[in-house]
Amino acid sequence: MLTYLIRRLLLMIVTLFGVSVAIFLLLRIVPGNIADILFDSAGMIDPSEKQKIIADLGLDLPLPLQYWSWLNGVLHGELGFSYVSEKPVIDEILPRIPITARLAGLALVFAICAGVPLGVISAVKQNTKLDYALRVLSLSGLSMPSFWLGLLILMACVRWFGTIPIYDRAPASIWAWIAMLAIPAASVGFRSSALIMRLTRSSMLEILRQDFVRTAKSKGLSDNAVTYDHALRNALLPVITTIGVETAFLMGGLIVTETVFNIPGVARFLVEAIRWRDYPMVQNLVMFIAIVVVTVNLIVDLLYMLVDPRIRYSE
Amino acid sequence: MAPVLEVSGLSTVFHTRRGLVRAVQDVSFSVNAGETLAIVGESGCGKTITALSLMRLIPQPPGEIVSGSVKVDGTDLLKLSEPEMRKMRGSKIAMIFQEPMTALNPLMTVGKQIAEMVMLHDGASKQVARDRAVEMLHHVRIPEPARRAREYPHQMSGGMRQRAMIAMALACKPKVLVADEPTTALDVTIQAQILDLIGDLQKEFGTAVVLITHDLGVVAEVAQRVVVMYAGRKVEEAAVGDLFAHPLHPYPRGLLGSIPRVGSARGLDVSPDERLREITGMVPALNDLPPGCAFAPRCSLADAKCHAQVPPFELKQPDHFAACWQA
């Protein structure tokens, strides 16, 4: 068990190293840097000034050197300064993380709380009108981009209620947080809930055909006991995997949703930073997201052990 | 002694896209306390569907029990409501399945799977139910039952899982035990142990056992009476010795002729140098049965009447029934 954990942690470091190289190179491949953008937008044309900015930021150094200085900084806990605001990156990111974390958490809770029970209902009532309705709903959830759904919800709220909660200052209580983030969380979590629902349904259908479900019935257990105590726990194994993968996908959805609903979280901030070619900002944000995703996947793998006694990670 | 289990006129069909499948037609039998009745026949002859019909575990739809009665201690199970039937399952009539590998829930300890049922039917507390589970595991001769009760099915061998299955089925001391090919998936040595175990427990608890099997060796060993099924119908019923000595219907005769024997074959005209005989042809599809005897297309004795009319199931010799125009 301990050996497994150590091996996993080492593997995580390798993965994160790969991510760091990839994001560093991708950013350099994208045409233009902060100096180009400043000059284009400000209309400055003095080339010596531009060269000075490039030299100041160290963008003229060879790539391996640039990479090394970033990595070295990260390893020493120094994330550098934003090119745009010129404030320390850490001060820019930290206050935004809780906002996105709450939104993502709420979206995930919504996705699971809606997806799993509806999937079970759909499976138990297979081929009834209810099942068909739920399958259509989940198919639409998978095919609808979350930004479009977000816009629709936005428009509908304004049309019918004349207003929608707008993020102007940090809400005071947890309930105020939930009230504020419920609609954006639902719009970004809808896709995940649809996926979780479809998977729960198919997984349940497969499990309900298994011999041990028949055994459970032959013992005289009620339908509910058979469905929930015996079948559902078995059916959840593949669903847990998906929940892990969906956490990564959620980040993509959050970027648009934060923009549509004007929420000042990290995801929207990342897009801004990319637009300005704010290298330290983008690199560190992506690394942060990568750490979250890798950690979630580790947690998912450890969760398996808790749910399924057959899985033991041996050395 | 009144029989514990009385099945009469049981018919089960499946509504499928390719038409009505008559899986079980007009099957009747009865079993006394402590007695073992074997139902034999090849795959698809309706023996498992008969077993599931007794438990009312036929998936509905597409399945449907269209007629008949299944009386356990005088109570007709087919007339009960589903909640009433649930109270009977496990407590009055229990079942053992063929596949010990997949018939237990992989995510639940064996002890809990047994205790769960004791709590349900006997209203026992958690502790009492757990103790009963350990006691039952001890009963089926699983060593270290207390430790095994805390284990999951994957930590046990196939034979041990089947023992656990039996412990579970007998935990509430049911009147009737339906065993659907309980030894088919096991090694031969384990098979004998499991059959002995069922026999011993049956004596101890006075359980009536319905043993579903295609293995005539098993039948000879443990059963007192045999029902032979073919294409969803009973074709012959007799005491074991009687059936093995003088099978009346050509189908069981063919079955007995296809068993390899050691040394000389008495009673049957099989000489040692002769090839094993097989029954030619195929089992008819249950959604497209011939108008007459279902075995007629494969039968060497069949005449025009056999092809035209279904033979009645009737007494041919003392306590020996068969459905055949030629017998």
Image (tube, rainbow, N blue to C red):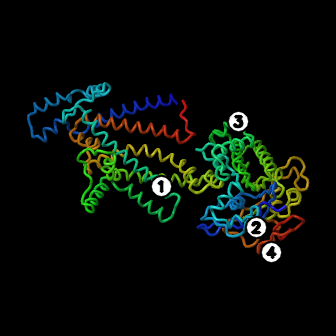
Q: Chain under label 4? A: B
Cβ–Cβ under 8 Å for marks 3 and 2:
no
CA distance separating discs 3 and 2:
43 Å
Nearer the N terminus, badge 4 or badge 2? 2
Q: Say what amino acid the circle numbered 1 marks.
A: Gly
Q: Secondary structure at mark 1?
A: helix
| Residue at 37 percent of width and 33 percent of height | A16
Few, some or many residues within 10 Å of mark 2 (<14, 14–19, 20+) = some
Circles 4 and 1 in contact, beta carbons < 8 Å: no
The numbered dot on residue B8 is 2
Say what secondary structure mark 3 lies in: loop
Mark 2: which amino acid?
Ser
Q: Is residue A75 in view from this perspective?
A: yes
Query: Residue at label 1?
Result: A119
Mark positioned earlier in the residue sequence (3 or 2):
2
Left or right of B32? Residue B22 is left
The residue lying toward the viewer, choosing from A241 and A125, is A125
**Quarter of the image that includes the C terminus of chain A:** top right
Query: What residue would you read off at disc 4?
Result: B305
Marks 4 and 3, how far apart in space? 62 Å
Left or right: A206 as drawn, with respect to A220: left
Return the residue at label 3: B144
* Residue A219 picture location, percent across and down: 66, 53
State the separation of the CA atoms marked 4 and 2: 27 Å
Say which residue appears at 77% left-offset and 58% top-offset.
Answer: B39
Image depth: mark 4 or mark 1 in front: 1
* Whole-number angstrom distance, CA of label 4 to CA of label 1: 56 Å
Mark 3: amino acid: Glu
